[in-house]
Amino acid sequence: MKPAHVRVRTVDPDTPLGERFADGLGYPLRGAALPTLVGLALVHYVGLLPLALGLLGSLLVWGATWRYAAECMLHTANGFADPPDVGLGDSDRAAWGLTVVHVVAAAFCVAMPFYSPILFAPTLLAVALVLPAIDMALAFDGSLLLALNPLHWGEIIRRFGWTYLIPVGINVAVGILAVLASLVSASLPRLLSLPLFAFAYGYLIVLGFHLMGAMIHRRHEHFGLTPEAEVLVEALGKNDDQRLLDHVRELAAHDPMAATRLLVPRLQDREAPAELHQAYRDLLRRQNLTDALLVHGQIRIAALMANNESRKALGMVQDCTAIDPDFLPDDPGNAGALAEVAARSGMRRMALRLCRGWLARWPRDGRAPAVALLAARELEAEGQAMEAAVLLGRVAGAWTDHPQHGELLARIQQLHSGTRA
């Protein structure tokens, strides 16, 4: 019996951090994370037991919470998109280290107002600043001695730069929630407030650790980390895909059309590797099937743009342009975005060709003024200010009621002033 094909959702390390943050807001609420947080929130009822038993039970639950959060950080740092199942990994030592550190930090912040109210705010800020560095060190190394080393904190903060403030902000949110919980709990029944705030704490803790894992994943080379997700995906898919590629190459020697047909079903899967796409294009070229090459290019560009791989999509545009100089992505949004990528990359001719093609194909699209302004900027850089002014004048005349009409006129005036000077 043929085993089922296993799918592993992964994340590209180059995914923008803003996108990771937006997606991360739902991370604690999907997969294994949601039932885990609900279960832990309910288990917090052990805190209602008599003093010693309740305290011990609560510490055990917090230890389990930080253990799972540590697993989420490691899982994310290794490139996995979804939360891990409960019980994965071996983070018991890290869990107890995290529990001790956070309990001590919380007790210190609570005691500070009684000792010196003036020092409370600086203490809270200092704790929020150093806790992410301690958390990351404990999750990865499990060494409390290393985690408490100020030199190690400084090295972690230096590696991340301003992005380090993201988990700091989440720590501040946890602190605010703690204050809110102490104020609101008095007006709510204990049976309701205990799991409610425990779930909220758990959500923020898992979110914070997930985002720290995302930050590490983006800079995995600096930490000497090889993301396990990439290795696992390769192990799961490489053998089948490699066998297919080898078979295609062998068949192509005497029947390139049959080899081409053999690749089609696999390429219909958006997760097909780039090597198979390249083999398909090589076979189409051998058979002079230029129309098929352009159709595949359109499909491939759309898929790459959907996966936020704009540079690879731009490379595909270049490949298709070599076949047909008038080639243009068939989606105006993708064509405009690729023109901007080309401009940022210093590919001025490509940016201009995309802009001109865009304006010729979609002159009534509301994004025309923005595309025209981009084209004018690139034309001016090429020393063609008058041509830029003419292009903008044509678009301005067609879009007199557009919000960017004034910007078009102002830019035309600047260009005319520059040429007169």
Image (cartoon, helix red, strand yellow):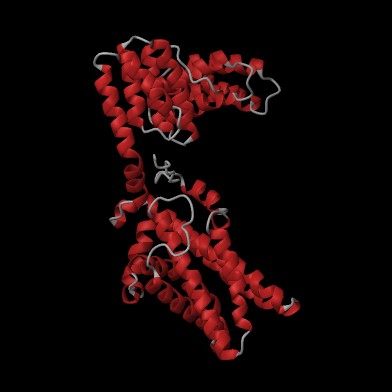
**From this viewpoint, which residue is outermost toward the front?**
1
Picture residue at 49% right of the left edge, 49% below the top: 20
Given residues 325 and 45, the one toward you in this image is: 45
How far across and how far down the image is residue 304, in percent?
Answer: 45, 31
Given residues 376 and 228, the one toward you in this image is: 228
How far across and how far down the image is residue 25, in percent?
Answer: 56, 54
How far across and how far down the image is residue 270, in percent?
Answer: 45, 32
Q: Can residue 151 be seen in this view?
A: yes
How far across and how far down the image is residue 97, in percent?
Answer: 40, 76
User: Is 95 left, or right, of 275 in this rendering?
Assistant: right
Q: Is residue 347 visible?
A: no
Picture residue at 43% right of the left edge, 21% below the top: 297
Relative to 391, say whether 43 is above or below: below
Q: How many marks?
A: 0
User: Is 381 left, or right, of 398 in this rendering?
Assistant: left
Relative to 97, say whether 164 is above or below: above
Figure quadrant of the N terminus? top left
Given residues 208 and 281, the one toward you in this image is: 281
**From this viewpoint, which residue is outermost toward the top?**
288
Quadrant of the rendered structure where residue 259 is? top left
